[in-house]
Amino acid sequence: MDRIALSTVVYAPREEVFDLLLEFPRYTRYSEYLTDVERDGDGGAGTDYRLRFAWWRLSYTVHSAVTAVERPSRIEWRLTRHLDAEGFWATTPADPPAGESAATRIRFEVSFDPHSAEPDAVSLPRFVSLDAVVDRVRPVIVDEAERVVERAVADVEGRRRDVEVVYHDRPDTV
């Protein structure tokens, strides 16, 4: 299993940050590769999502489900088809720096087995192996996780700034 875990501090109240993270359809604004999100449910535990990604010559629909919501601290999810993966968003209070009235630490963590991808779920170009794609996609996933966090911070704060992203874990092959 590969694992990506990163965190940063957002200068906003915890409840506001949590609400933003819970709104998965909004993620199309943060991701370079996420093109569409369909939701079946109210966003809480039991909600199913279909997330359409496009990268390189590949397109792929990820089926996920929210497995637990503990307001305002944690949102857990797992993929339900084609790939073994699960993860969470967590929020904890943080001390705001001078000039800021509130701060929240957000943590994103995902564990995934890239070799569990079902070959028929991804339409690969002719003569391209799934293993070759897995090797190319690992660094893209890490970069994308950081990009999503940085853009989510800008969205909730209402401005862009340099965001210090701390990696707690990431695949060795990146």
Image (cartoon, rainbow, N blue to C red):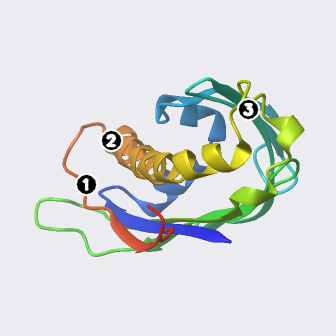
Viewer-side residue, 134 vs 109: 134
SS at mark 1 in the image? loop
Q: Which mark is residue 60?
A: 3
Residue 119 at x, y = what percent?
A: 84, 42
The residues tagged by marks 1 and 2 sit, at their Cα atoms, a distance apart of 9 Å
Callout 3: SS:
strand
Task: Examine the rendering and report whether any part of residue 105 can be seen.
Answer: no
Along the viewing direction, whichever of 24 and 93 lies nearer the viewer: 24
Please give left or right for residue 83 compared with residue 133 in the image: right
Q: Is residue 102 above or below residue 1?
A: above
Q: Quick check: marks 1 and 2 in contact, CB under 8 Å?
A: yes
Q: Which mark is residue 163?
A: 1
Total labels: the figure holds 3
Q: Nearer the viewer, residue 23 or 76?
A: 76
- Mark positioned earlier in the residue sequence (3 or 2): 3
Residue at label 2?
154
Q: Amino acid at mark 2?
A: Ala
